[in-house]
Image (cartoon, rainbow, N blue to C red):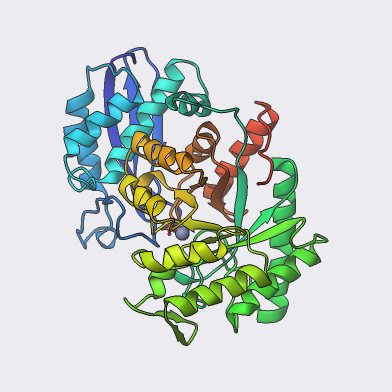
Amino acid sequence: MSAPIQQLRGLEILDSRGRPTVMARCRLRSGAIGRAAVPSGASRGAAEALELRDGDQTRYRGLGCRQAVAHLDGLIADAVVGRSFTDQAAFDQLLDTLDGTPNKARLGANATLAASLAFARASANDRDLPLYQYAAAMDTAPGVLELPRPMINLFSGGKHAGGQVPIQDLLIIPQATTMAGLLEQAVAVFQSAAEIMQQRYGMRLLTADEGGLAPPFPTLDALFEDALEAIERAGLRPGSDVRLAVDVAASHFYTGHAYQLGGRTLDGTAMIDQLAHWAEAYALASIEDGLAEDDWTHWSQLCTRLAAQTLIVGDDLLCTNPARIERAVRTAAANTLLLKVNQIGTLSEALAARRIARAAGWQVIVSARSGETEDSWLADLAVGWGGDQIKIGSVTQSERLAKYNRLLELERFDGIPLRKPT
Ligand code: PGA
Ligand code: ZN
């Protein structure tokens, strides 16, 4: 049982894109305090929970979060202040009931997640637990604690850059055996890539929302070839030292019946052929959102074709939504969950989504959003919930490094080992 909540408050703060987002602070009567800030996506799935924005064009181009903050200070605070909760699930259940809609449309998922996380932090602090241990204790069957393996943005296009290439992110997965070692590899590859960009495209170090490099690649294959070259230039071997992965974010170039890929129009079958070609030519470890979020039939065909050698990851497809994950399990449409807690709106619902994926034998990638804050809770969550991988962004920009640095801290000071590659 938690100590009674003494105060819950919300605050409009700014995220890494300079857009408003929500922070909450929860104080328990014991004196323990927890605060947390929520991220915000740009390349959103249609089935995500609602992020409440004010729509008042006189402030922050309509993106203000004063209503979400008012819900924290008003409806949510009124419902929780003075009360104790048996556990996180009971607190989150109250938020869900108070909201009463299927997608947090009343309170806003930015308000509910801020409350959920701030309560989690306050409760963890009250028990003198690091947040990753509190997260692990939320699970009924916590395994051995390990650090997730990072997949790191190298190049970006689509909605995370100027749309100069349709593919949203090309990621590297360094294979070193420690967190410190693999971040060193990632930075070496990033620096080599930046040199190539300068020489080949005359580009200064301009980066996309998540810190990836965003040059005007002449072709899609150049995106992959430049990545291979950057790995080799860093003195590493593609495949054995550093693997490649993509987030295609295909919903964003799908017209309802065809994929508009770099001047070509592909039907679902041709798009699968294209993905299979990349998977083989570049030994891709995973393909995220290779197809559009509602192209269910082709997702199953893609899995039949590639799931034996490549992780087929659902982000927009699944939206961390239990009903959509169940459908994907039933129809064998994916084999890996990209887990983003703000797609569903509370920690407990995200954990339920993860349980369904795990029960189906899927892998889980815990993911940040393109709009992030300096808060590092994502790293603790990924450790406590046994994420196989973590997707944070590039190895630049402090909103990304806050999470990587937390993982370094957990490796060195808390002695948590890095998960073996799977
Ligand atoms: P976001 O997308 O811009 O919605 O955070 C990140 C992703 O597609 O993985
Ligand atoms: Zn994605």
Residue 153 against residue 260 in the figure, above or below: above
Residue at x 32%, y 42% (from the top left corner)? 345
410 sits left or right of 261 in the view: right
Q: Position of residue 237 (x, y in %)?
A: 79, 61
Task: Using the image as rendered, state which of residue 128 and residue 178 is in the foreground.
Answer: 178
Quadrant of residue 83 in the image? top left
Quadrant of residue 354 in the image? top left
Residue at x 21%, y 61% (from the top left corner)? 58
Q: Position of residue 378 (x, y in %)?
A: 49, 40
Q: Position of residue 367 (x, y in %)?
A: 49, 48
280 sits left or right of 343 in the view: right
Task: Using the image as rendered, state which of residue 65 and residue 128 is in the foreground.
Answer: 128
Q: Position of residue 80 (x, y in %)?
A: 22, 24
Q: Name the quadrant of the N terminus.
A: top left
Residue 40 visible (yes or no): no
Quadrant of picture, ligand 1:
bottom left
Residue 330 against residue 168 in the figure, above or below: above
Task: Using the image as rendered, state which of residue 7 and residue 312 is in the foreground.
Answer: 312
Residue at x 69%, y 61% (from the top left corner)? 190
Quadrant of residue 273 in the image? bottom right
Residue 30 visible (yes or no): yes
Task: Using the image as rendered, state which of residue 223 and residue 146 is in the foreground.
Answer: 146
323 sits left or right of 304 in the view: left
Residue at x 30%, y 56% (from the top left corner)? 47
